[in-house]
Image (cartoon, helix red, strand yellow):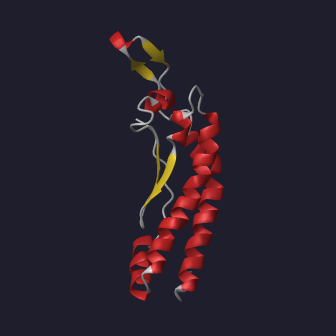
Amino acid sequence: MPIVDAVEIEGFRQLRTALRALGSEAPKALRVAGNQAAQLVVDNARPRVPRRSGKAAGSIKARSTQIATKIASGGRAAPYMPWLDYGGRVGVNDTAVRPFIADGRYVYPAYRAVKPEFSRVLNEAVRKIAADAGVELD
């Protein structure tokens, strides 16, 4: 099981609620800000993924809602991506073997590599969105 590392912003849900009361565009801007921060991880992880067709690297994408930012990988385009990232045994009679690394090889290491920049980008975006909506943050 991978180690989940998270960036939490204290009062984020309350901020979203306050912004929603001020206007419909602010919560949408939070989602866009989340995608901008997540794109840093995507851009760091993609070049590290081994390539044959490029589908595995291309499957790493930023996903966000108004309250969460995620990195998705694999899916229908590259169902083998979890095996590439974490390893294990797959295939007929488990013949394809890759050493298992619980923390992954690409996405989580990329996140840790850009975590300071990720936090900075998200923090600046939240402050700008709040200021544009007339909300003062501490």
In the rendered image, residue 22, in percent from the top left (x then y), is placed at: 43, 88
Q: Up-down: is 115 above or below 17? A: above
The residue lying at 62 percent from left, 47 percent from top is: 43
In the rendered image, residue 41, in percent from the top left (x then y), is placed at: 59, 49
The residue lying at 50 percent from left, 35 percent from top is: 103
In the rendered image, residue 124, in percent from the top left (x then y), is placed at: 62, 71
Q: Quadrant of the N terminus?
A: top left
Left or right? Give the position of 44 relative to 12.
right
Q: Up-down: is 16 above or below 52? A: below
Q: Up-down: is 56 above or below 110? A: above
In the rendered image, residue 106, in percent from the top left (x then y), is placed at: 56, 36
Identity of the residue furthest to the front in this view: 53
- Camera-nearest residue between 127 and 38: 38
The residue lying at 43 percent from left, 22 percent from top is: 88
Q: Number of numbered discs present?
A: 0
Residue 35 visible somewhere in the drawing: yes
Q: Quadrant of the C terminus?
A: bottom right
Residue 9 visible somewhere in the drawing: no
The residue lying at 44 percent from left, 82 percent from top is: 19
Picture quadrant of residue 118: bottom right
- Camera-nearest residue between 26 and 103: 26
